[in-house]
Image: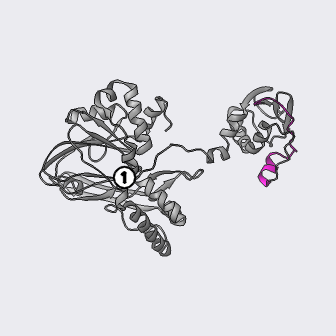
C-alpha cells in the first residue's frame, strides 16, 4: 500500500505488483504524482474532494477512489509501506511541497519557457539601445560579465568594447565565459581573403544570411568575431534574428512551421584544398523545438551547405520547399536586417543557434579572428551568475 499523508488527512493508493521501495522507485512515483497537478491545485484552493481519475492509464495506476480532505497544509507526506516481497525501508517518509509538484508536473512544464528571449527586427533592437560591455569590466567583474550574458541570452548577440586588437586578447575574452570549441578550422581561427580554405568566408564576396556549421551533427553554439584590421571599404556584418522570422511563419502559416520542424535534411561540407581534407555531414530539421512546450531552441539555416533532400517522400519535399520559401522571405525582409560595422577593439558574440549572420562584399585588406564556443559552458556560466538559461 502507498500512502500520501497531508497534515490532517491521509490518502491511500494500491501500489502495482512488483513495486520495489528504492530511490529509483520513489523518483518514478514522484513523476507519476506530477500528473495529479490539477487535483493538487484543487487542494491548494481548499476544495474538499477530488473524484477518481477517469483515464484508462490512471485507472491501472490508481485503482482506488481518491478523497482529499480539507487541510491548511501546503505539502504532502509520502509514507512508504513495505510489502513482504519487497525490499527497502518500511515507514520512510518523503515530503513534497504542493507548489513543487504543480511546478514540476507535465502541465506545469508546458507553460514554462526554458530560456526567456526578446525577439527582434532592426527597429526593435535599435530602440532597445542594448549597451555594450567594457573589456576590463567583462574580464574583472562578475557584474560586467553578468550584464553581458543577460544581453546575449535575451537578444542572441552582444558586444564587448575596447578590446586590444590581437588574437591573444580575443582568446582571453572568449575563455572568460566558455571553453573554446576546436573544430576542423582549428581552435582560434585567423584569416584574410586569401581563399586558403575551401569556404566562401575566405574571400571578399558578399555572404547571404546563414548559420555556421550546419554540417556538424551538433552545430557550434556561439561564434566570436573580431575584426583586427580593415584597409578598404564595405564589409559590414549582417545580423538577422532567426527566431523572430520563425515566429512570423508560426503566426501566419503554422502548418509550414510544423513541417520545417519535422523534416530532417542533410547539410554537407567537402574540402580538398592543400592539406585540408574534410567531409562533414550533419542531419536535422531547419527548426528544432522542445516537444513538450513547442519552444524553438535551434535554427539550422544555410543554403550554401544544404545537401540533396532525400530523407522524405517527394510530395513532402514539394511542401517543404514551399515552407522554406516562406521562412526565407521572412529572413530576407529588409526591416529584419541589422547591419553593423565590425572594427578593431569591438568584439561580437553571436548565438549561432538563433541569429543568422552574413556580410557585404568589401575591398582592401581585412583581417578577422575568432572562434567557436561550447554552448553548454556559456549557459553554465550564466546559470552560476543567477541567470535563467
Residue toward you, 135 or 293: 135
Q: Position of residue 333 (x, y in %)?
A: 37, 62
Residue toward you, 165 or 211: 165
Task: Tell me if residue 102 can be seen.
Answer: yes
Identify the magenta region.
Answer: 55-75
Task: Tell me if residue 299 can be seen.
Answer: no
Q: In the figure, is residue 260 to the left or right of 51? A: left
Spot the residue most to the front: 127
The prevailing secondary structure element of the residues shown in magenta is loop
Residue toward you, 151 or 27: 151
Residue toward you, 103 or 304: 103
Q: Is residue 300 above or below residue 52?
A: below
Q: Is residue 353 above or below residue 188?
A: below
Q: In the figure, is residue 308 to the left or right of 42? A: left
Is 69 contained in the magenta span?
yes
Which residue bears the numbered disc 1?
122
The mark tally for this picture is: 1
Q: What is the image's colouring?
A: one colour
Q: Position of residue 91 (x, y in %)?
A: 80, 26
- Please name the residue shown 36% across and 47% down the image: 126
- Please name the residue shown 43% across and 66% down the image: 324
Q: Is residue 360 above or below residue 49?
A: below
- Please name the residue shown 43% across and 41% down the image: 153
Crowding at label 1, few (<14), some or many (≥20) Cα neighbours within 10 Å? some
Q: Position of residue 154 (x, y in %)?
A: 44, 42
Tell me where residue 24 sits by quadrant.
Answer: top right
Is 189 contained in the magenta span?
no
Q: Position of residue 247 (x, y in %)?
A: 49, 57
Q: Is residue 238 above or below residue 34?
A: below
Quadrant of image for the N terminus: top right
Q: In the figure, is residue 23 to the left or right of 201? A: right
Amino acid at each position: 500500500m502507498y500512502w500520501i499523508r497531508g497534515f490532517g488527512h491521509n490518502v491511500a493508493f494500491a501500489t502495482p505488483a512488483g513495486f520495489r521501495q528504492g530511490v529509483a522507485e520513489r523518483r518514478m512515483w514522484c513523476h507519476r504524482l506530477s500528473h495529479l497537478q490539477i487535483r493538487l491545485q484543487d487542494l491548494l484552493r481548499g476544495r474538499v474532494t477530488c473524484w477518481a481519475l477517469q483515464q484508462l492509464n490512471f485507472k491501472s495506476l490508481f485503482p482506488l477512489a481518491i478523497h482529499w480532505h480539507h487541510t491548511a497544509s501546503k505539502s504532502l507526506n509520502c509514507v512508504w509501506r513495505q510489502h513482504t516481497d519487497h525490499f527497502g525501508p518500511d515507514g520512510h517518509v518523503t515530503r513534497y511541497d504542493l507548489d513543487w509538484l504543480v511546478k514540476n508536473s507535465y502541465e506545469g512544464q508546458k507553460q514554462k519557457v526554458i530560456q526567456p528571449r526578446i525577439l527582434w527586427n532592426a527597429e526593435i533592437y535599435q530602440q532597445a539601445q542594448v549597451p555594450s560591455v567594457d573589456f576590463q569590466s567583462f574580464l574583472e567583474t562578475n557584474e560586467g560579465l553578468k550584464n553581458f550574458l543577460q544581453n546575449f541570452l535575451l537578444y542572441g548577440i552582444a558586444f564587448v568594447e575596447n578590446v586590444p586588437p590581437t588574437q591573444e586578447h580575443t582568446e582571453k575574452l572568449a575563455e572568460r565565459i566558455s571553453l573554446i570549441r576546436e573544430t576542423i578550422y582549428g581552435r582560434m581561427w585567423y584569416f584574410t581573403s586569401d581563399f586558403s580554405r575551401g569556404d566562401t568566408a575566405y574571400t571578399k564576396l558578399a555572404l547571404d544570411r546563414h548559420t555556421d556549421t550546419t554540417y556538424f551533427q551538433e552545430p557550434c553554439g556561439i561564434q566570436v568575431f573580431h575584426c583586427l584590421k580593415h584597409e578598404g571599404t564595405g564589409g559590414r556584418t549582417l545580423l538577422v534574428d532567426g527566431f523572430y522570422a520563425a515566429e512570423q511563419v508560426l503566426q501566419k502559416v503554422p502548418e509550414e512551421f510544423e513541417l520545417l520542424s519535422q523534416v530532417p535534411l542533410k547539410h554537407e561540407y567537402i574540402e580538398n584544398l592543400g592539406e585540408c581534407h574534410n567531409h562533414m555531414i550533419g542531419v536535422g530539421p531547419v527548426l528544432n523545438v522542445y516537444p513538450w512546450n513547442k519552444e524553438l531552441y535551434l535554427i539550422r539555416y544555410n543554403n550554401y551547405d544544404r545537401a540533396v533532400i532525400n530523407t522524405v517522400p517527394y510530395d513532402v519535399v514539394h511542401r517543404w520547399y514551399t515552407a522554406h520559401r516562406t521562412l526565407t522571405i521572412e529572413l530576407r525582409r529588409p526591416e529584419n536586417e541589422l547591419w553593423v560595422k565590425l572594427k578593431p577593439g569591438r568584439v561580437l558574440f553571436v548565438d549561432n543557434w538563433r541569429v543568422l549572420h552574413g556580410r557585404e562584399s568589401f575591398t582592401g585588406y581585412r583581417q578577422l579572428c575568432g572562434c567557436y564556443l561550447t554552448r553548454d559552458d556559456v549557459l553554465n556560466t550564466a546559470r552560476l551568475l543567477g541567470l535563467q538559461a
